[in-house]
Amino acid sequence: MFSKYIILVVHVATVAFCANILAIIPTPSYSHQKAYYDFWNQLSLRGHKVTVITSDPQKNETLTNLTEIDINWAYKFFADISDLAENSLTMWSFHKWAHDMSYNISEALLSQQQIQDFLHNKQKHFDVLLVEFFYVELLVLAEKYNCPTILFSTMDVFVVTHERIGNPTSPALYPDEGSSFYAPLSFSERIASMIYYLHTILFYEYISHPIREKLLHMFFNTTSTINKLIDNIDMVFINANPVIQHPRAVGPTTIYTGSLNYKFATALPKDLKHFLDNATNGFIYFSLGSNVKSKDLKAESLKAIVETLRELPYKVMWKFEADPEDMVGKPDNVKLVKWAPQLGVLAHPHLKLFVTQGGLQSMDEAIFNEVPCVVIPFFADQYQNAKLMKNKGFAEIVERSPYIKQGELTNAIMKVINNYSKYKNSVRTLKQLSLDTPMTGLEKAIWWTEYVIRNKGAKHLRNPAADLPLYQYYLLDVICFLLSITIFTLLVIYIVLKKLLNLLKVRFSTKLDLVDKKSQ
């Protein structure tokens, strides 16, 4: 009987804390969406009513507290990413591309009648708003619902966001996520990183933010600026792990929720399982992720990959988005699949190597399954991730510009396989370190979300550095004052000494004159 009362009390407590949560994650990339699936699911299972605006809805009818608004149409703004990544997208054009892509999606989203009906529904109320960090203009919805906000990302946020919320942004220690630099930086890299830092700050301050403010005035009755909306953020969730990524000094409202989507592998489809089980000599998994398509690679790159895989004494499973007959000269040891359950493949005991583009989710899953890698980075954070993986000792890098070269790819693959135990031990150690934490990333994300809801925000944890002018933060006024005092003091000492010296000269010369007169 007593146990029934306990169950009743727990149930009432859970219901009493049921909150309405609105999450907006428009980026049309399955890897970005998948990273937060468990987060939305667990929030809904804890009794919260979660509404997610997403380009890749899960459509899980068992999650009765999870409502998904499907904006799969956003993929039309992401359709040419493979061509851009391979041919024209560089770190110097990355932020312009990210701005254009997210602005176009945001404008289309707010223009949708379905979204307008949703936003103008006076029955809707939310206790917290979560917005993907590319779409800062959508933070304005917090004014409509009078609720706290959480900015979240599936990678590290850009330097402009770190700086706005008061986190240190030294270009030498913390190169921007869009750059190809990874600490420690050489002298020439520090110069380039500083220029890139200024380039990024100026781009957002004087180009991106003013353009986004047009959306605010177009769709909302507000006087807020983008900077003001960012200033009013209560928390920032970054899907990164300081043990894996470069450790960074951050304020208390920046929460690292690294590896939100850690989960154990599900069963493989029968045909894949049969192929991998029969690879008794080991197999290689080749996948460039969900954004860059292998089928769209340059002919030179594609030929180099095919010829490399053909010569390997291992079976290869290649995520290739076209039909097998579309590949001329497909090697007999290669199995092409348009899609593969990556966690299941990476967990297979016969796997020897993962050839990856270096996306954050792929890197996390490789570490979780202790798989050595060869990385072919294409864009965004993949360059930094590739250097990180090499620096941590479990990967080699292959350059893809102007195209992938057969010799380089073959050498990298054979170097890892021939030194398998070395790379395997490195990634195993990294996994152990990354999992040795008091809370998982998912548990932290849930706890801090509910903290923000319970306390109706987290402004009391705001980093005071965010409110200091730059001249005060870097003590420029103090340095100038102390320099002025020092210079003034030295000047006074100089003048006094000079006068004393002149007096001594006069007295000395007078004495000499008297001595001369006496001698005469």
Image (tube, rainbow, N blue to C red):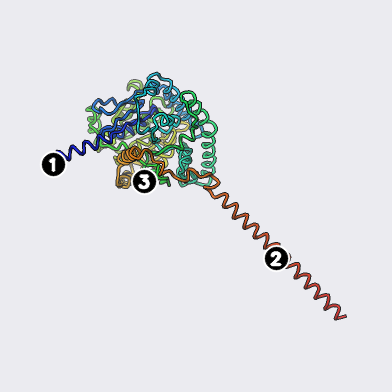
Task: Please tell me whether residue 188 is drawn above or below residue 309 in the rendered image.
Answer: below
Q: Is residue 493 visible?
A: yes
Tell me if 422 is positioned left or right of 459 in this view.
left
Tag 2 residue: 497
- Of the numbered discs 3 and 1, the one sitting upstream in the chain is 1
**Label ID, residue 243:** 3
Residue 76: image location, x then y, percent:
41, 21
Q: Is residue 71 visible?
A: no
Closest to the observer, 244 or 14: 14
Above or below, comparing residue 72 to residue 38 in the picture: above
Q: Quadrant of the C terminus?
A: bottom right
Query: In the image, which is nearer the foreground, mark 3 or mark 2?
Result: 2
Q: Position of residue 97 (x, y in %)?
A: 48, 29
Residue for point 38% across, 33% down:
147
Amino acid residing under circle 2:
Leu
Amino acid found under the numbered disc labelled 1? Phe
What is the C-alpha distance between the residues marked 3 and 1?
Answer: 45 Å
Q: Looking at this view, is 505 or 264 the one in front?
A: 505
Q: Is residue 496 left or right of residue 61?
A: right
- Image-based side of 81 in relation to 352, left or right: right
Q: State the residue position of label 1.
A: 2
